Image (tube, grey):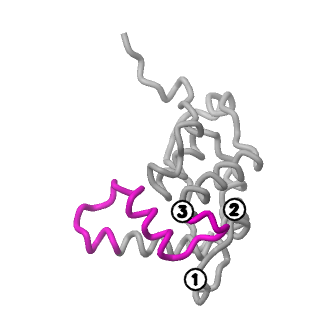
Amino acid sequence: MGACASTTDGDNTPRSKKAEEKKASLREIRARLAHVFEKMDSKKLGYVTHTQAMKFLMRSRRDLNSDQNKRMREVQNGVKKMFACSKASEMKDAISEDEFIAGYSNVIYPQNLTLYQLDNFLRKIFGRLAVGVENVHKPPSHHRIATM
């Protein structure tokens, strides 16, 4: 998998319950990745620069350590991984939507994730702004907490 993040969540749910969940299709994965790219492409030019990606992740990844220097290093590492997954040259200052979607699709699709796991993966990598309200898939019933 290289520089790209792992999608394993350590879930020990029995296989029979996981079979009830809908697996994310390649079309759904690509649609969600297009949504993430659209959020990052603030200038709507069809490509994302290192600077745009940094700004997006700084806003979206509020879960990172509050120490500004450490947070900046983590975001910089995230941007490097993003460009590596997208097969963009380190000398290249921007990645296109096609490069971004192709790179991450090749990482995500073989994982055979459910829609819920896909949304969690995207939120973990790209932050809270990556998965819009319209894209959030509700957790399967065995992940929900019963309320009375």
**Which contiguous range is marked in magenta?**
43-72
Of the residues shown, which amino acid type is indicated by label 3? Ser
First-in-chain label (1 vs 3):
3
Q: Position of residue 82 (x, y in %)?
A: 56, 70
Q: Do the CB atoms of the residues marked 1 and 3 lie less than 8 Å apart?
A: no
Q: Residue at x 54, y 61 (%)?
A: 40
The residues bearing labels 1 and 2 have C-alpha atoms spaced at a distance of 17 Å
Regarding mark 2 in the picture, which secondary structure is present there? helix
Of the residues shown, which amino acid type is indicated by label 2? Ile
Q: Nearer the viewer, mark 1 or mark 3?
A: 3
Q: Position of residue 89 (x, y in %)?
A: 64, 85
Q: Which residue is mark 3?
A: 42
Disc 3 crowd rating (10 Å Cα; few below 14, some 14-19, many 20+) is some
Q: Nearer the viewer, mark 1 or mark 2?
A: 1
The residues bearing labels 1 and 3 have C-alpha atoms spaced at a distance of 16 Å
First-in-chain label (3 vs 2):
3
Q: Do the CB atoms of the residues marked 3 and 2 lie less than 8 Å apart?
A: no
Regarding mark 1 in the picture, which secondary structure is present there? loop
- Residue 18: image quadrant is top right
Q: Compared with residue 24, is residue 104 higher up or lower down, i.e. above or below?
A: below
Q: Which residue is mark 2?
A: 101
Q: Which residue is mark 1?
A: 93
Left or right of 98? Residue 141 is left
Q: Residue at x 57, y 63 (%)?
A: 41
In the rendered image, the residue lying farthest to the bottom is: 91
Front residue of 148/13: it is 148
Disc 1 crowd rating (10 Å Cα; few below 14, some 14-19, many 20+) is few
Q: Position of residue 114 (x, y in %)?
A: 64, 40
Front residue of 47/24: it is 47
First-in-chain label (1 vs 2):
1
